[in-house]
Image (cartoon, helix red, strand yellow):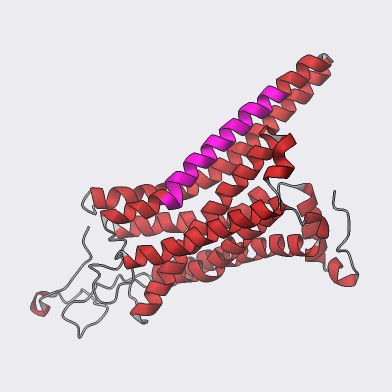
Amino acid sequence: MEPEFIFNRTDVVKDIHLCYESENVSCIMVITPSTIRVLLYLFLGSLSVLTMCGNLLVMISIIYFKQLHTPANYLILSLAVADLLVGALVLPFVIALSISSCWYLADFICKLARSLDVSLTTSSILNLCFISIDRYYAVCQPLRYRSKINYHAAVIMIVVSWGVSVLLGIGVIIMGLNEGKCEGKCFSFHIPISSITACIFSFYLPAIIMLSTYLKIFLVAQRQAFSIQNKTGQGIKSGASVSKMERKATKTLGIVMGAFLICWTPFFTGMTLNPLSNYSIPIPVIETFALLGSSNSVLNPFVYAFFYSWFRVAFRMIISGKIFQGDFANLKLF
């Protein structure tokens, strides 16, 4: 679907509003009812605040409590930083475009905002990918875990996730995300087929890695549970314990992969199919998918932090202000 241009001013119908009435090539302004605008402000604003608050709790917990200074938690810290920036920088930009279809700021700001969008969301996805690799070694190769996933390895994974994300953010803009846009429009999702390469590195490759590692984790955990059951031979009690372990593993993996795939699959599928189908997918649909993908950043603190009891203890101490009443940095959380 091509952006909506107005080339001949004499053909403009009276009830059509343009972003720039004085321009010969202007985008059509989408008029949103005031009630819907207010609801969008409340919903998207709450989503942005919740994203920042949830990930800020994760960051403070890991930085403050020394017991949480582990390579695995540093990966979660990196994820929380990316997700917090999504809530602070990307979602407000999404809010601005959702409320008003026209863009009146400088074109440089539009490019910068979209570059941050691509970089931060990609960083969040890549951090999720590296966390799955960490979990793979923890469950499938526990004897090699400390030698494979150490502080040096964690730093490398964090640098790679942010480095690749920044390069993609810059590269996608250079490849022409804003080609063919009419005046008053910021990023119409009219991307060239060559930009599908960015989708591969931003989503498809990390998704394949995550699916493979979590499937392996689930199979190994299930095999270990059956092995424990066969060795203990404690009958019904052991069987119930093993069944509980299997349900917990299934539930955890289901939440992790379900949240990730539900949030991001529609957007990247649409971005991939759009240039192949002559841009037949409406822009509002792609924008809705983009918002759904960004909402994954508000779910990550619940999936990767609230799931662990020691994080919940840390959160309660932070929210209650107890950490300001004394030195609890060396407190044993687990």
Q: Is residue 212 magenta?
A: yes
Image vertical order of residue 26 relative to residue 79, above or below:
below
Image vertical order of residue 33 relative to residue 19, above or below:
above
Q: Is residue 3 magenta?
A: no
Which quarter shows the N terminus? bottom left
Where in the figure is residue 163, as x and y percent of width and height? Answer: 51, 61
Residue placed most toward the observer, 266 or 332 = 332
- Residue occupying image coordinates x 24% and y 76%: 17
Q: Is residue 186 left or right of residue 17?
A: right
- Residue occupying image coordinates x 37% and y 47%: 269
* Rendering quarter of residue 78: bottom right
- Residue occupying image coordinates x 77% and y 15%: 230
* Count of numbered labels shown in the rendering: 0
Looking at the rendering, the stretch of residues picked out in magenta corresponds to 201-224
Where in the figure is residue 20, as x and y percent of width and height? Answer: 25, 81
Magenta stretch secondary structure, dominant: helix
Q: Is residue 109 left or right of residue 29?
A: right
Q: Is residue 56 left or right of residue 130?
A: right
Res. 125 in view: yes
Where in the figure is residue 19, as x and y percent of width and height? Answer: 27, 78
Residue placed most toward the observer, 35 or 187 = 187
Which residue lies most toward the right here? 326
- Residue occupying image coordinates x 48% and y 43%: 207
Where in the figure is residue 203, as x and y percent of width and height? Answer: 45, 49
